[in-house]
Amino acid sequence: MIYLLLLPAVIMLALSFRNIEKIRYILPITSFLILFPSIKLFFLPKPYHIWGEYLVADNLSAYIMLVSSIVAICVTLSISTMALHIKISDKANARFYRFFAIFWIGLSISIVANNMGLYWIGLESATLSTVYMIKTNHTSFARKEAWNYMIVGAIAISLILFGIILIYASAKPILGEDAMNFSALLLHAKEIKAPFLFEIGFAIAVLGMFIKMGFFPMNLWLANIERASFYPVAALFSGILESAVIIGFFRFSKIADAVNPLHVFIFVFIYTILTIFIVSFLIYRAKDFMRLFSLSGVEHMAIIALFWASGGVFAALLHFGAHAFLKPALFLSTGVLESNGQYKIAGALKGYRGIKGKIFYYLSALFLLSIISIPPSPMFFSELYGFGAMIDMAKENKHLLLMIGAITFLLLLLSVIFYKFVEIYQSMKYEGKEEKKEVYGNEVLALIIFAISLALLLTPWSFEFLRSLS
C-alpha cells in the first residue's frame, strides 16, 4: 500500500524533469493517480498497517487523505490553464509539479504517521517544498515572502519538534521507545507519571502547529505569502497543507485530553478566541481576494480547533471537510476573478458569457456565500453542532453562563466577517464596470468537483461516518 500511495508522486517527479512540450497537460493527468490509493485506503478495514507500527491508517487519516486527494486533483486541473491567465513559463510550471510531488510525499507520510518523529519529518518535507512552490512566481515580492515563510516555518517546526521531545521524555519511563507511538501514547496516557512535562510539551507542539496555520500572534504572514504566490499554491496551503497540520493537532490533543481535558480546553479556547478576535478585524480591512480568503482560512481553522477541543468531533470534521473544499475553490476562482487585473473586487462577477461562464458565475457566488455559513452550506450545520457541543461541555462543568457569554462574543466577531463578505459579494455583483473574462473547461470542472464534494458531505452516509469518528 505504501508504494501505491507514493507512486503517483514519484511518477510526477520523474516527468517534471522531462523537457517535452505537452508536459503542461501530461502532469495534471498524472495527478489523477493520487485519488485511487486514497479511495482504496478509505474502504480498507481499519486500523490498516501500511508500514508496521510506523504508518497506520485509521478512519480519521483515511478521511483526511481522501479530502486532500480531491483537492490536489482540482488544483492540478486549474494549473493546466494557469498560463492563460497569468505569465508563467513551461519551466516554472514543471518546477511547480516537481516540488508538488515532494510536497505530496511529505503530506502523505504526516497524515498516516503513527509515530511523532515520522509525523514531524513528513510535515517538514511538505513545508520545505512549498517554499520553492512560492518561488515559481519570479517576482521580488514572492522571493521575499518565500524567505519569510522559511523563517516562520522554521520557528513553527522547531516548536513542534521541541514539544515532541518533551512528550517523549514524559512517557519514556512507562513506554520506552514506544513513547514516540501515537496509539501507544493514547492507550497509556493516564499512566504518565510526569503529566506536567507532557502538558508543557503538548502546549509547545500545538503552539507550533497554530503558528503554521496563521494563528495569533503571527496572523499576517500566511496572507502575505498567499498573496505573493500563484493562486494554485494558495489553494494548496489552504486545502492540503493545513490538513497535515490539523491532523497533528487532532492526534496530540486526543492524547492530552486523556491526561487533563480541562487544561486542553482552556488553552485552545483562549488561543482560538484571541485569534478570531484579531482576524475578524483584519478581514474587515482586507482589500483583495487573496488576503480575504487567506485570513478567512485562519478563522475557520481556529473554529475547527475550538470545536474539537470542546468535544464536538463531528462538528470539527464536518467543518474541516467543508473548509478543505470551499477555500481552495475560492482561491482557484481568484485566478479568473482577477484575470484582468489584481485587486479588482467591484464588478468581479460581471462579464461572463456562455455556459462555462454562467457555471463559473453561479458556483463562485455559491462558494462565497457558503464560506460564511449561509444554509445549506455544510458550515451552517457544523457551527450549529459545534456550538451545541460547547454548551454541552459547559453544562457538565457547570459553567453554562460563562460559555453562553463566550459564544455570544464569538458570534459578534463572526458577524463582522459575515458583513464583510456580504459587502464584497454585493460589490462584485452590482458595482464597477463589466469586463469580459475568459473561463476555461478545466477550471469549471474543478469547481464542479468541489461542488459535488460539498453536496456529498451533507448526505446521511457522510454524517453517519463522521459521527463514527467521535
Image (tube, rainbow, N blue to C red):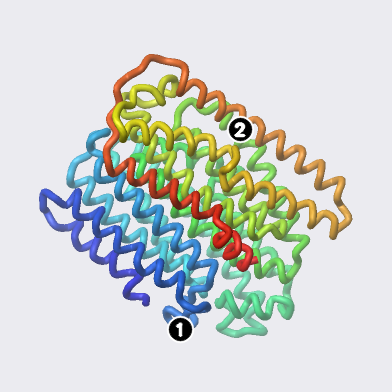
Q: Residues within 10 Å of mark 2 (few under 14, many from 20)?
A: many
Q: How crowded is mark 1: few (under 14 residues within 10 Å), some or many (20 or more)?
A: few
Quarter location, residue 204 = bottom right
Q: Would you say the residues marked 1 and 2 are in contact, meaning their CB atoms lie under 8 Å apart? A: no
x and y percentages locating residue 327 in the rendered image: 47, 43
Quarter of the picture holding the C terminus: bottom right
Can the viewer see residue 163?
Answer: no
x and y percentages locating residue 94 in the rendered image: 21, 51
Q: Tell me what residue is drawn at x 26 percent, y 56 percent.
A: 98
Q: Tell me what residue is drawn at x 63 percent, y 64 percent.
A: 467
x and y percentages locating residue 129 in the rendered image: 35, 55
Q: How far apart are marks 1 and 2 (CA)?
A: 46 Å
Is 118 positioned to the left or the right of 277 in the image?
left
Is 140 positioned to the left or the right of 119 in the image?
left
Secondary structure type for disc 2:
helix
Q: Which mark is residue 294?
A: none
Secondary structure type for disc 1:
loop
Can the viewer see residue 66?
Answer: yes
Q: Residue 52 carries which label?
A: 1
Q: Tell me what residue is drawn at x 40 percent, y 53 percent.
A: 71
| Residue type for callout 1 | Gly
Mark toward the viewer: 1 or 2:
2
- The residue furthest left is 20
Quarter location, residue 393 = bottom right
Is 210 positioned to the left or the right of 358 in the image?
right
Earlier in the chain: of badge 1 and badge 2, it is 1
| Residue type for callout 2 | Ile
Q: Residue 417 carries which label?
A: 2
**Between 136 and 463, which is closer to the camera in this rendering?**
463
In the image, residue 442 above or below residue 20? above
In the image, residue 460 above or below residue 328? below
